């Protein structure tokens, strides 16, 4: 029977050296252009170059996580709720419910320093069992007992974590 209900987050980090497909390239270029545009409000004197400097000089610059994230929302919508780089043991994509954009660093003068993460967050999953570094899961709350359908195995890996756990 089910051990717990969980939610999983998977962090996909992107920078100028890690752009492997059209999705990553589009997110990188759009988020950088949005950063350049939105950062102007926190750099009126033109003395700051990096996201770190902007935050140090004006605490309101923390909102650039949220504001820059708008630039990728259309691309994420095209994913059809499938986490692009996370597959189960059968090679099928793992589905996400929501996401969060995190601006890690950027530079107004050097595009190559732009780095961000997209945190893909699943809906409720039923944790049926675990063995080694693998989880036996099913989508939704299937803790009522009886036949559990739609099971899949997910291997734990870097960037993947359980963010919610309920017995």
Image (spheres, helix red, strand yellow):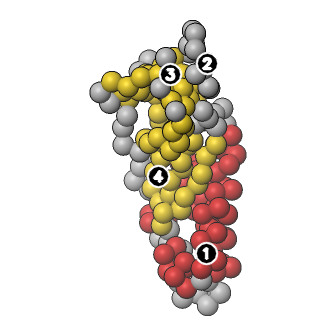
Q: Which of marks 2 and 1 precedes in the sequence?
A: 1
- What residue appears at the point 61 percent right and 46 percent down from the top-left corner? 99
Q: Nearer the viewer, mark 1 or mark 2?
A: 2
The residue labelled by disc 3 is 2
Instruction: Looking at the picture, tell me which residue is in the foreground, 23 or 92.
Output: 92
Mark 2: few/some/many CA within 10 Å (<14, 14-19, 20+): few
Nearer the observer, disc 4 or disc 1? 1
The earlier-in-sequence mark between 3 and 2 is 3
Q: Secondary structure at mark 1?
A: helix
Badge 4 marks a residue whose secondary structure is: strand
Residue that mark 1 sits on: 61
In the displayed structure, 112 sits above or below 165; it is below
* Residue plotted at (47% across, 36% down): 85
Q: In front of the other: label 1 or label 3? A: 3
Mark 2 or mark 4, which is nearer the start of the sequence? Answer: 4
Label placed on residue 38: none
Q: Earlier in the sequence, mark 4 or mark 3?
A: 3
Identify which residue, 36 or 58, lies in the foreground: 58
Describe the element under mark 3 as helix, strand or loop.
loop
Q: Which residue is mark 4?
A: 14
Q: CA distance from mark 1 to mark 3?
A: 44 Å
Residue 99 versus residue 96 in the image, above or below: below
**C-alpha separation, residue under disc 4 versus residue under disc 1:** 21 Å
Marks 4/1 in contact by CB < 8 Å: the verdict is no
- How far apart are the alpha carbons under marks 4 and 2? 40 Å
CB under 8 Å between discs 1 and 3:
no
Which residue matches tag 2? 144
For image coordinates 60% across by 58% down, the residue present is 31
Of 143 and 40, which appears nearest the observer? Answer: 143
State whether residue 100 appears in this view: yes
Task: State how far apart marks 1 and 2 are (Cα).
Answer: 46 Å
The reply to whether the C-beta atoms of the residues labelled 4 and 3 are less than 8 Å apart is no
């Amino acid at each position: 029977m089910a051990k717990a209900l969980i939610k999983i987050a998977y962090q996909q980090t992107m920078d100028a050296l890690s752009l492997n497909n059209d999705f990553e390239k589009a997110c990188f270029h759009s988020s950088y252009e949005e950063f350049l545009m939105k950062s102007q409000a926190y750099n009126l004197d033109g003395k700051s170059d990096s996201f770190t400097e902007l935050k140090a000089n004006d605490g309101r610059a923390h909102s650039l996580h949220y504001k820059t994230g708008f630039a990728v929302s259309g691309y994420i919508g095209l994913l059809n709720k499938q986490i692009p780089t996370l597959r189960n043991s059968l090679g099928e994509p793992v589905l996400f419910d929501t996401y969060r954009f995190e601006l890690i660093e950027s530079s107004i003068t050097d595009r190559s320093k732009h780095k961000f993460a997209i945190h893909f967050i699943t809906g409720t999953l039923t944790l049926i069992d675990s063995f080694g570094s693998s989880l036996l899961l099913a989508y939704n709350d299937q803790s009522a007992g009886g036949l559990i359908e739609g099971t899949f195995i997910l291997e734990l890996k870097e960037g993947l974590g359980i963010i919610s756990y309920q017995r």
